[in-house]
Image (tube, rainbow, N blue to C red):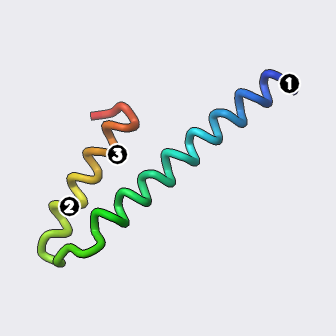
Amino acid sequence: MDPMMAGMLTALSVVTIVAAAAVLITHFAVKGTESRHRAVVLEGVAAVIRAIRGKR
């Protein structure tokens, strides 16, 4: 396999996995919370996702 193609497939796989993890984290964090607590929960999830991506 061409090294350039392998690199692109690896990058695409990493992006897909991180996006899926972000969706699952958000889903499980919001599930079962009351509507008045969702804003705080979503801010916490956003902080976790930023940490995973490496940005503050």
Disc 3 and disc 1: Cα gap in Å? 32 Å
x and y, in percent, of residue 13 in the image: 63, 41
Q: Please name the residue that numbered disc 2 is placed on.
A: 41
Labels 3 and 1 touching (C-beta < 8 A): no
Q: Residue at x 37, y 38 (%)?
A: 52
Q: Give the spatial CA distance, label 2 vs label 1.
A: 44 Å
Dot 3 or dot 1, earlier in sequence:
1
Amino acid residing under circle 3: Ile
Q: Is label 2 in a helix, a strand or a loop?
A: helix
SS for callout 1? loop
The residue sitting at 25% across, 60% down in the picture is: 42
Q: CA distance from mark 3 to mark 2?
A: 12 Å
Please give the residue where the numbered disc 1 appears in the rendered image: 2
Q: Is residue 14 left or right of residue 44?
A: right
Looking at the image, which residue is at 71% across and 33% down?
A: 8
Residue at the far left: name it.
36
Identify which residue is drawn at 30% across, 72% down.
31
Is residue 33 placed above or below 49 in the rendered structure? below
**Residue holding disc 3:** 49
Q: Quadrant of the N terminus?
A: top right
Residue 43, percent from left and from top: 21, 55
Q: Earlier in the sequence, mark 3 or mark 2?
A: 2
* Tag 3 secondary structure: helix
Is 55 on the left-hand or right-hand side of 35? right
Q: Amino acid at mark 2?
A: Val
What is the three-letter code of the residue carrying label 1?
Asp
Which comes sooner in the sequence, label 2 or label 1?
1
Looking at the image, residue 29 sits to the left or right of residue 24; the answer is left
Percent position (x, y) of residue 45? 27, 53
Count of marks, rendered view: 3
Q: Position of residue 47 (x, y in %)?
A: 25, 45
